C-alpha cells in the first residue's frame, strides 16, 4: 500500500507521523526519512525506538532556499543518499512502514527525479506500507499510489 499526503494545507507530515505512531502501538515498526526539512528536533521520537526510527540526510540546518548554489548541490547529493537508504530499507524488509517525508517536495524542487522515486516505489513489498508527503503530487507518482489524500487549507 502506497499513500500520498499532498496539498497546500498543513498537517501532511503530522498525519504521516501519527500513522507511524499508531502502527507502532499495534506492534509494527516504522522508518521515517525526512527530505527538505530545516532542522527539526525529533529527539522526543528517540523514546519510540526501536519501533520508530527517523533519519535525516541533510547536513545544513538552514532551509534549502536559503543556501548558496554550492551548498544546494551538496544537499542534493545528501538527499539522494536518503533515497538510496530508502532502497536499502525496502530491500531489507525490516520495517512495516516507510515514511518519505517531503519527498514530493524534493521532486518539485528538482532535487530528486520522479523516475528515481518510482524506482524506489517499485521495491515495495505487499506486506509493507509507504507514505509519501509533500505539497505537489505529480501524475506519474500518483499512478503508483493506492491512496491519495489532498490536504487543503479552507481558511
Image: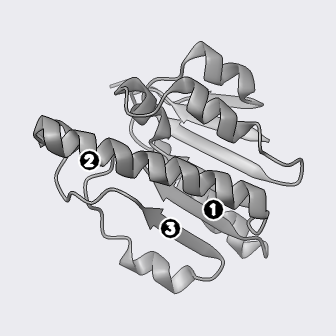
**Is label 2 in a helix, a strand or a loop?**
helix
Labels 3 & 2 near each other (Cβ < 8 A)? no
Depth order, front residue of 33/24? 33
- CB under 8 Å between callouts 1 and 3? no
Is there a contact, CB below 8 Å, between mark 2 and mark 1?
Answer: no
Upstream in the sequence, badge 1 or badge 3? 1
Residue at point 41%, 35% (across, down) = 106
Above/below status of 37 relative to 31:
above
Question: Relative to 34, is 153 above or below?
Answer: above
Q: CA distance from mark 3 to mark 2?
A: 21 Å
Residue 115 image position (x, y, % from top left): 59, 25
3 relative to 142, above or below: below
Callout in the foreground (1, 3): 3
Q: Which residue is mark 1?
A: 20
Point out residue 69 in the picture as x, y percentages from the top left corner: 14, 35
- Nearest to viewer (mark 3 / mark 2): 2
Residue bearing mark 3: 54
Whole-angstrom CA distance, mark 1 to mark 3, is 11 Å
Residue plotted at (37% across, 78% down): 43
Q: Which mark is residue 74?
A: 2
**Label 1 neighbour load within 10 Å: few <14, some 14-19, many 20+:** many
Rounded to the nearest whole Å, what is the CA distance between mark 2 and mark 1? Answer: 30 Å
Amino acid at each position: 500500500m502506497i499513500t500520498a499526503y499532498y496539498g497546500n494545507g498543513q498537517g501532511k507530515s503530522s498525519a504521516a507521523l501519527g500513522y507511524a505512531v499508531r502502527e507502532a502501538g499495534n506492534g509494527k515498526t516504522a522508518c521515517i526519512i525526512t527530505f527538505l526539512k530545516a532542522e527539526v528536533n525529533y529527539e522526543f521520537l528517540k523514546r519510540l525506538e526501536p519501533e520508530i526510527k527517523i533519519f535525516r540526510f541533510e547536513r545544513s540546518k538552514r532551509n534549502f532556499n536559503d543556501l548558496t548554489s554550492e551548498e544546494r548541490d551538496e544537499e542534493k547529493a545528501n538527499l539522494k543518499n536518503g533515497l538510496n537508504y530508502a532502497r536499502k530499507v525496502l530491500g531489507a524488509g525490516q520495517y512495516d512502514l516507510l515514511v518519505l517525508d517531503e519527498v514530493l517536495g524534493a521532486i518539485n524542487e528538482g532535487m530528486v527525479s520522479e523516475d528515481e522515486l518510482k524506482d524506489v516505489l517499485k521495491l515495495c513489498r505487499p506486506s509493507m506500507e509507504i507514505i509519501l508527503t509533500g505539497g505537489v503530487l505529480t501524475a506519474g507518482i500518483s499512478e503508483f499510489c493506492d491512496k491519495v489524500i489532498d490536504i487543503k487549507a479552507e481558511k
